[in-house]
């Protein structure tokens, strides 16, 4: 029946989840060796030891093979530093979205080449007071197409920026994130990102994701909130507010 | 079972978030979008006879065959293609010089037509100065067939100012599931008041009715269109009405299996108008059609205004002009021979042209 709607909403949710789910996402924190985390939409993460964390989204990886490595760097200073590097091959996913009928996100006559892309982030975190952490980040996505290419941009929030590097070679972003406690087991996260897409037809986007996190135990977090996006698109400027929700399990 | 139970939740989420996410909805009654040409052209000081043309321009697609058509393979057009097709329509407008132009299937901000605002594009390149636009299909992102952002509808253009224009919503197709209806076309009546020199209360009523429904939606839309005209008439308005009614008049010889019917693969079944023969009768009874129904019954051919196949030629009558006044003359502009212009390359619909005697 309603596979269309479910796919649509799942896509939206997972997209937003990618942008901010997980206890340590967007910060310089790295899981200890043997620690695991996974969410409904957030990727599977595992601490590998020596300041290394690997992550992969199992469902997405079927259609878009990828892996991400996050490495904490020992600075000895007040700022904790980490870098995160991911490698992805989104071609099968994009091709599956290029189809007729409901759920067709890209036109069926699109020619989508083999694409290899990487997403590289520098993250620095600093504690503020007893229960808050501020993190700043810089991000560069790079993409390379191999072969004939003729596919339209996906002119919707979040997707446009995150596929820009696939089409146009590069996407950059600067971000700031504040994590803290509201009261008891209730925490908050405010994540602000500004995108610059130097090679794309539409060249900027700003995203503000605000979520509340309920952490009744160390092993479970429920997140809910919204992502506001104000951005340029090939047709002009527009704004949207998208729901953000996830259930995250950690062990 | 669980998914079925979740339907209302999905729908609530979608409709509740409409203003923040997809923006597909309309109010029952809302203002139309007003346009003015970049530079104005002097309009005649008198308007005792008004040349009216109605034309469905297929969103500037010319005769490209799109994925939803028989044998069609095309999706998005390039900017060059759209401008080439629009320029052909503009050449036609500049040659025929209508005073009032009613258009259906006009894109104003759609990915499929390279985001060209076709109302503004036409206004800026013709003698027409003012426009009113109402969308019939709008979504910030249409997750179907890769259509992406969509905004297309009806537009009424005029030499003279449009003082007021309103979009009146028509009934939606009830047979579709709620989520499909949420993203589907939403038909309407565009009622524009044109400030005709020397005449007052002139309403130009433009519509494009449902093409695909088996649940009587089209009949309800026709009746609503008739009722709207009747209300205007009772208020003493002078009415110029027209559009693509997607319906055949009484006296039609062929009701199905048209000569341009698809014999290959097609998304849609062939059109079948059986059982709809009398749906337009009240419109014809209460208002003056450019096309006399008796003349049509004698020979359908000269009034045909649509074809899906240029090799076959025009096959059926879908486009109409009505008034509560008088048509002095007019025709369906099918060709050089009938109408003085080769219109087959412009769109899958032929323009309908008429001279209206302005009422006092």
Image (spheres, coloured by chain):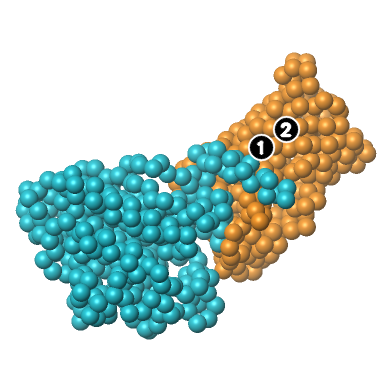
- Residue projecting furthest to the top: A129
Residue pictured at 36% horizontal, 65% vertical: B246
Image mark 1: chain:
A
Residue pictured at 63% horizontal, 41% vertical: B9
- Where residue A240 sits, quadrant-wise, is top right
Crowd tier of the residue under label 1, counting other residues whose Cα lies within 10 Å: few below 14, some 14–19, many 20 or above: many
Q: Residue B99 or B253: which is nearer the viewer?
A: B253
- Quick check: A223 left or right of B49? right
Residue to which mark 2 is pinned: A223
- Where residue A120 sits, quadrant-wise, is top right
Q: Which chain is cyan?
A: B
Residue A231 seen from this side: no
Does A116 sit above or below residue A229? Answer: below
Q: Earlier in the sequence, mark 1 or mark 2?
A: 2
Residue to which mark 1 is pinned: A244
Image location (x, y in percent) of residue B271: 44, 73
Residue pictured at 34% horizontal, 46% vertical: B168
- Quick check: B209 left or right of A52? left
- Label 2: element kind: strand
Total number of numbered discs in the rendering: 2
In three-dimensional space, the C-alpha distance between marks 1 and 2, rounded to whole angstroms, equals 8 Å
- Label 1: element kind: strand
Image mark 2: chain:
A
Q: Residue B157 or A189: which is nearer the viewer?
A: B157
Q: Which chain is orange?
A: A
């Amino acid at each position: 029946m309603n596979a269309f709607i479910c796919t649509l909403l799942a896509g939206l949710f997972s997209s937003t989840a990618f942008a901010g789910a997980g206890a340590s996402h967007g910060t310089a924190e790295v899981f200890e060796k043997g620690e695991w985390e996974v969410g409904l939409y957030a990727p599977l993460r595992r601490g590998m030891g020596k300041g290394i964390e690997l992550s992969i989204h199992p469902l997405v990886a079927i259609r878009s093979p990828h892996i991400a490595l996050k490495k904490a760097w020992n600075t000895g200073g007040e700022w904790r530093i980490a870098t995160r590097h991911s490698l992805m091959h989104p071609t099968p996913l994009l091709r599956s979205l290029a189809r007729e009928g409901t759920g067709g996100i890209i036109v069926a006559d699109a020619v989508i080449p083999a694409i290899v892309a990487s997403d590289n982030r520098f993250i620095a975190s600093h504690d503020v007071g007893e229960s808050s952490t501020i993190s700043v980040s810089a991000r560069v996505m790079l993409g390379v197409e191999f072969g004939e290419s003729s596919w339209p941009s996906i002119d919707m929030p979040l997707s446009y920026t995150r596929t820009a590097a696939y089409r146009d070679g590069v996407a950059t972003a600067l971000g700031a994130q504040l994590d803290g406690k509201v009261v008891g087991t209730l925490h908050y996260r405010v994540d602000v990102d500004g995108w610059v897409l130097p090679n794309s037809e539409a060249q900027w986007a700003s995203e503000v994701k605000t979520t509340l996190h309920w952490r009744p135990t160390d092993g479970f977090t429920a997140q809910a909130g919204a992502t506001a996006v104000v951005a340029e698109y090939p047709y002009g400027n527009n704004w949207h507010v998208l729901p953000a929700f996830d259930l995250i399990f950690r062990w | 079972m669980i998914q079925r139970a979740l339907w209302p939740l999905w729908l609530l989420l979608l409709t509740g978030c409409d203003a923040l996410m997809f923006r597909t909805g309309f109010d029952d009654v809302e203002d139309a979008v007003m346009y003015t040409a970049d530079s104005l052209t002097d309009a005649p000081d008198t308007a005792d006879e008004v040349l009216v043309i109605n034309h469905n321009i297929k969103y500037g697609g010319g005769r490209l065959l799109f994925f939803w058509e028989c044998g069609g393979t095309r999706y998005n057009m390039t900017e060059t293609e759209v401008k080439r097709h629009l320029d052909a329509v503009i050449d036609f407008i500049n040659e025929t010089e209508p005073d009032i132009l009613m258009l259906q299937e006009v894109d104003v901000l759609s990915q499929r037509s390279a985001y060209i605002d076709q109302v503004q594009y036409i206004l800026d390149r013709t003698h027409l100065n003012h426009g009113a636009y109402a969308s019939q299909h709008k979504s910030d992102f249409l997750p179907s067939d890769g259509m992406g952002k969509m905004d297309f509808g009806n537009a009424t253009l005029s030499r003279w100012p449009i003082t007021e224009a309103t979009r009146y919503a028509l009934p939606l197709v009830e047979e579709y599931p709620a989520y499909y209806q949420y993203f589907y076309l939403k038909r309407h009546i565009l009622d524009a008041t044109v400030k005709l020199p020397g005449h007052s209360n002139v309403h130009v009523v433009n519509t494009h009715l449902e093409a695909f429904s088996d649940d009587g939606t089209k009949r309800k839309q026709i009746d609503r269109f008739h009722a709207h005209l009747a209300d205007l008439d009772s208020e003493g308005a002078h009415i110029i009405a027209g559009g693509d009614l997607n319906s055949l008049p009484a006296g039609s010889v062929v009701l199905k299996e048209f000569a341009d019917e698809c014999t290959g693969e097609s998304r849609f079944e062939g059109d079948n108008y059986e059982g709809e023969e009398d749906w337009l009768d009240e419109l014809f009874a209460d208002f003056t059609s450019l096309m006399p129904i008796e003349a049509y019954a004698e020979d359908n051919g000269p009034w045909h205004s649509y074809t899906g196949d240029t090799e076959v030629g025009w096959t059926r009558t879908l486009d109409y002009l009505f008034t509560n006044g008088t048509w002095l003359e007019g025709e369906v502009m099918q060709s050089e021979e009938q109408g003085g212009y080769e219109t087959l390359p412009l769109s899958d619909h032929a323009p309908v042209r008429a001279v209206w005697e302005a009422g006092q």
